Amino acid sequence: MPSNQQPISLLLCALGGEGGGILTDWLVETARHAGYPAQATSIPGVAQRTGATTYYLEIFPVPTADLGGRRPVFGLNPLPGRLDALVSSELLETGRQITNGLASNAHTLVITSSARALTTGEKMVMGDGRRDNAELLSLVNTHSRARHVLDMAALTKQAGTVVSAVMLGAIAGSGLLPFARRDYEAVIGDGSGSAKASLRGFALAFDAVHAQRTQAAYIEQVLADEPADTAPQASLPEALRREFPLEVHGLMALGHARVCEYQNAAYGERYAERLRRVLAAEKTGDPQNLHGYRTTVEMARWIALWMAFDDIVLVADLKSRASRQARVRGEVKAGQDDLLRVYDHFKPGAPEFAAMLPERLAQRVLAWDRRRVATGKAPWALPLKIGTHSVLGMLALRGLAATKRLRPLGSRFQTEQALIDRWVDAVVRLSAMYAPLGHEVALCGRLIKGYGSTNERGKDNLLHIIDHLALPALDDPFTAEQRCKAVAAARQAALSDEAGKALDQALRQHGAPARPVKAQPIRWQHNPRLKVKAAARP
């Protein structure tokens, strides 16, 4: 045995509930089954998707029988830059460990999933807070001597198992450890249904990584390309394809299909008509097409999202679709002979009911609710528990979903259309005058997101930016470029701070008034402990 023989070191990263401890036990048992010394330690992580639990293994690459009674000395922690393998079930976790300096392009094989589970920090951002997958993959490519990237989430779902089995198959397929495939499979077992599912996941990952090893050119393709989208692609009607430039077709096809499904074909035509106005204005402001119809492309995205706003009709439709029922059965792994009960909880309030009523009736309902709140009561709401596995429950949801034909008569539908037209009018006027300013106002469509108070706040911010930063440029064309920068700064501020303090500061810096303060009711709560103390006094 060479005197400089070193253990093979692996760092395993798994999210909560993914079976990282099981994977560690499998690897240790595989080493013992194959006759090799091994040791494992773990470092607990945190919950709510703010980190991962890591497991550190060292495996001596010489069989115990050949050591002559000697025992190798293992380490308890990975050494920065000396790690032999980094295995992770989530792409951002891979990036975190690399930034900790554990991996190096001289020693480390990186096995990672290309799938993402968004962190709490990513979800809290008002705009699109997702980390760029391309940057993470570039980080993997730079700080590894070799790498295997595969969609472990898709393989796990395909096999009907847990991701730890897929990770084990990827490690086995990489050839890093001196074990035969049968050693791994023997540890997993072959008797129970869960063992069979684990073996399926193991085999899928083993074959995927083995194929990457034998095809070096395919490795670069995996790193460069995101997982293929197997969803059916929307197609744009031929008449609209001839009318709109090629640059717009992709997003417009998705947007047109979405609004048609949301309401009807006439609603899809209304969507197309709004885009026609934007396209005509952009051609006026940018006759040489120096920017590739970028404003129309952005509006194709954000108009569709706003026009398909969330309401109780859409929620009922989504929750009662056959595809949703199939997905739920798949997630809980229910068989054909299994009984599955699904209960959906709803709590619509006065605004949700008023949204479906004509304007006059809606105002009466909202006024009644405001009077309740003014007297110290909580806003009215109707808690509902609907069993969507039952005939009555499904009929209730499908009946509510069928009322989408009446949606245009509701007060919210009319209000939303008026606000959309107000925004589109501003983009059209500004694009014809100064194309970059129109584009910045189009990007402000990102402010409209979520539901309830978040949605209302986004619309208020958008209209305030239009009225006080963008449209004043119409009266003073010499400041259009400055207005363009001001709108961009205000939009970024609104997306970075949900409370709106950053937006108010950006508005004041560019000579616009801060948003008006909205009145909020003060509710006094009785402390029951004070009554107990008073009763206990002599």
Image (cartoon, grey):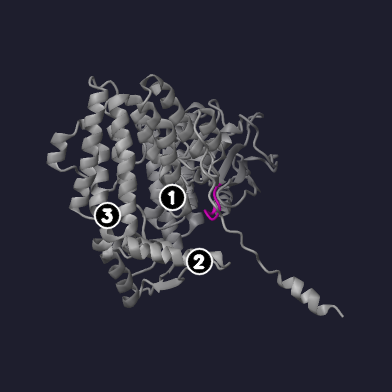
Relative to 405, is 293 above or below?
above
Query: Residue 11 in the image: x percent, y percent?
Result: 58, 41
Q: CA distance from mark 3 to mark 2?
A: 34 Å
Q: Residues within 10 Å of mark 2 (few under 14, many from 20)?
A: few
N-terminal of the pair, mark 1 or mark 2, is 2
Q: Residues within 10 Å of mark 1 (few under 14, many from 20)?
A: some
N-terminal of the pair, mark 3 or mark 2, is 3
The residue where tag 3 is placed is: 262
Q: Is residue 533 magenta?
A: no
- Which of 369 and 270 lies nearest the eye of the viewer? 369
The amino acid type found where label 3 is placed reads: Tyr
Q: Which dot marks residue 297?
A: none
Query: Residue 115 in the image: x percent, y percent?
Result: 43, 44
The residue where tag 1 is placed is: 455
**Residue 341 shows up from this direction:** no
- Which of 204 and 28 lies nearest the eye of the viewer? 204
Q: CA distance from mark 1 to mark 2?
A: 23 Å
| Secondary structure mostly seen in the magenta stretch | loop
Relative to 490, is 334 above or below?
below
- The residue depicted at 62 percent of the width and 48 percent of the height is 45
The magenta segment is 14-19
Judge left or right: residue 363 versus residue 531: left
- The quarter of the image holding the C terminus is bottom right
Residue 193 occupies quadrant: bottom left
Judge left or right: residue 20 versus residue 382: right
Q: Is residue 15 magenta?
A: yes
The amino acid type found where label 1 is placed reads: Asn
Q: Residues within 10 Å of mark 3 (few under 14, many from 20)?
A: many
- The residue depicted at 40 percent of the width and 45 percent of the height is 448
The residue where tag 2 is placed is: 371
